[in-house]
Image: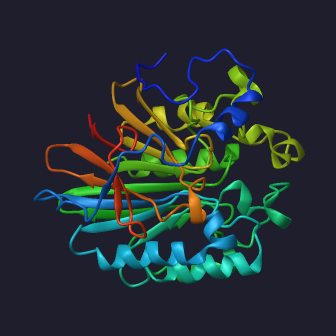
């Protein structure tokens, strides 16, 4: 068992059937009851720091509130210099229904970053199949975010070797000063052979600090998704989706990704995922067998008004080997200073 650090979350410790939890959550008074909202602007970053920005689940922007998505990426470009932003990570569920109209919104929003900031992304369950039903692994993603658009960028590493013309699985490289990073972006519920490929990439770049982005990894109870132990008590596990059932369960959840990939390498420092509702937040720090601490975070704001109220997660990498986490909304011009939304991680 890895050593873990956990925090208390809404509903934790309640001995209630899992089916009652969404109802309890719906009865909570409002989307900001546990928030500690403070007016912006953000404080200056520390000398020598740089920022990696996180865009979780933009599906509701694409379906009904596109301006929020447009404003997020516009703000990131405007803040590039002031916050020393080095990369933007999208955690999947780019769209809600995998439709042409919604992919056009996503393309317009993300292309605002072109020529300004490197950005890396993964598909979520809503990005698969007609209507976003995740019945199989067909997606319109490559029509709007083709490999050809990224292949010649200095940060582009490559794609899954058996699907070289698809961005559903990709890796990227960037450096800041003497720090070198690898970002592995894996599909929703990665297939076993995709994990084989990911292990090869992580080993090839073992001199880089590695970050895994994938759509479903950590649940809101601060535990990794674990179908073998919890089954559907942890709702929305990849194993419970039609694409798993039609694909002979060739999917991987968080525990399988931990055991089969993340814990096998000394260089992983972070995992990031969206997907999960309830409070949309989770945090877990685990030690791999070699003693390396890996911080794992769930962050999802799609339950907020207007598709997510513009909330972003900003990771400030500091010289003292810590990461300062701040959730900020450029549309509300507010910081959420709640301990779940504003905290510091120490790197090994």
Q: Seen from this angle, which residue lies furthest left?
A: 47
Answer with the quarter of the image where residue 280 lies.
top right
For this orientation, the residue located farthest to the right is 246
Colouring method of the image:
rainbow
Q: Is residue 72 above or below residue 274?
A: below
Q: Is residue 151 above or below residue 2?
A: below
**Residue 71 versus residue 158: which sits nearer the camera?**
71
Report x, y in % for residue 241: 81, 44
Where does residue 338 sit, x and y in percent of width and height? 36, 41
Specify the farthest residue to the front. Answer: 29
> How many marks can you see?
0
Q: Is residue 171 above or below residue 195?
A: below
Residue 279: percent from left, percent from top:
55, 41
Residue 58 or 98: which is nearer the viewer? Answer: 58
In which quadrant of the rendered image does the C terminus lie?
top left
- Considering depth in this image, is 191 or 39 the residue closer to the camera? 39
User: Is residue 99 shown left or right of residue 141?
Assistant: right
**Residue found 39% across the figure and 41% down from its top:** 268
Q: Position of residue 49 (x, y in %)?
A: 18, 58
Residue 94 visible, this orientation: no
Residue at 53% over, 73% down: 69
Relative to 104, 150 lies left or right:
left
Q: Is residue 231 visible?
A: yes
């Amino acid at each position: 068992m890895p050593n873990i650090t956990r925090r208390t979350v809404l509903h934790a410790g309640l001995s209630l059937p899992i089916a009652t939890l969404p109802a309890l959550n719906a009865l909570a008074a409002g989307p900001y009851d546990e928030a500690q909202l403070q007016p912006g602007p953000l404080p200056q970053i520390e000398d020598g720091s740089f920022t990696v920005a996180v865009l979780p689940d933009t599906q509701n922007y694409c379906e009904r509130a596109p301006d929020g998505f447009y404003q997020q990426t516009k703000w990131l470009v405007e803040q590039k210099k002031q916050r020393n932003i080095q990369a933007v990570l999208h955690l999947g569920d780019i769209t809600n229904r995998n439709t042409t109209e919604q992919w056009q919104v996503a393309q317009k929003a993300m292309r605002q970053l072109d020529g300004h900031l490197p950005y890396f992304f993964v598909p979520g369950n809503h990005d698969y199949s007609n209507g976003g039903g995740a019945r199989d692994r067909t997606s319109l993603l490559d029509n709007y975010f083709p490999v050809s658009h990224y292949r010649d960028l200095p940060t582009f590493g490559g794609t899954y070797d058996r699907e070289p013309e698809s961005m559903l699985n990709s890796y990227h490289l960037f450096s800041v000063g003497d720090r070198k990073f690898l970002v592995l972006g894996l599909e929703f519920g990665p297939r076993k052979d995709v994990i084989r490929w990911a292990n090869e990439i992580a080993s090839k770049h073992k001199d880089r600090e590695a970050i895994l982005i994938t759509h479903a990894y950590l649940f809101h109870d601060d535990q990794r998704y674990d179908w073998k132990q919890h089954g559907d008590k942890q709702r929305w596990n990849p194993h419970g989706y039609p694409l798993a059932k039609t694909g002979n369960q060739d999917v991987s959840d968080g525990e399988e990704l931990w055991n089969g990939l993340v814990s096998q390498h000394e260089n992983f420092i972070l995992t990031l995922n969206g997907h999960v509702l309830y409070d949309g937040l989770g945090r877990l720090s685990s030690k791999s067998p070699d003693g390396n601490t890996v911080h794992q975070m769930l962050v999802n704001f799609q339950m907020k008004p207007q598709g997510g109220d513009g909330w972003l997660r900003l990771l400030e990498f500091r010289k003292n080997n810590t990461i300062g986490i701040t959730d900020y909304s450029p549309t509300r011009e507010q910081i959420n200073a709640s301990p779940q939304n504003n905290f510091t991680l120490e790197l090994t």
